[in-house]
Image (cartoon, rainbow, N blue to C red):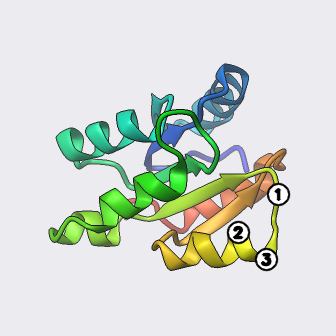
Amino acid sequence: MDEGLKISVLVVDDNHINRLLIHKILKRWSADADFAENGIEAVHKIETNSNYNVVLMDIHMPEMGGIEATRVIRSKPEPYFQQLPIIALTASVLSEQMEEIYKVGMNDYIQKPFEPKALFDKLSKYQTP
């Protein structure tokens, strides 16, 4: 697991401690990381950069949550916005929330708190070749 990840990740989480923790983990794997504090900021970064391999999207955030942000991203017609892998970061795995996650076009989820290996396994699927 200490091998590197050739990946650019946008981490969207309103919790500063969560962002620091994920940053530390991604840095250990030599992954590129960028951060947003809410869905509005995430949508803006994705629209302007279009170079992320995957997005880790918290579900519950002020201003705009992960579900709404994913809806906005998926509503754009360009292939990048349709195909960008979005992984939900969620503290609860309620069946209705899981339905919502997949219905809006998220690709996967990871439950907080997560094991670094679980995150590594999910992210490694989306590396650049």
Residue appearing at x 66%, y 34% in the figure: 22
- Say what amino acid the circle numbered 3 marks: Ser
Q: Secondary structure at mark 1?
A: loop
Q: Residues within 10 Å of mark 3 (few under 14, many from 20)?
A: few
Secondary structure of the residue carrying numbered label 2: helix
Disc nearer the start of the sequence (2/1): 1
Residue 73 in the image, given as x and y percentages of width and height? 32, 59
* Residues at circles 2 and 3 in contact by the CB criterion of under 8 Å: yes
- Separation of marks 2 and 3 at Cα, in angstroms: 5 Å
Which amino acid, by three-letter code, is at mark 1? Ser
In which quadrant will I find the C terminus? bottom left
Say which of 107 and 24 sits in front.
107
Residue located beneath label 3 in the image: 95
Q: CA distance from mark 2 to mark 1?
A: 8 Å
Residue located 53% across and 51% down the image: 66
- The residue labelled by disc 1 is 92
Q: Are marks 2 and 1 in contact (CB under 8 Å)?
A: yes
Q: Which mark is residue 97?
A: 2
Residue at 15%, 68% in the rendered image: 78
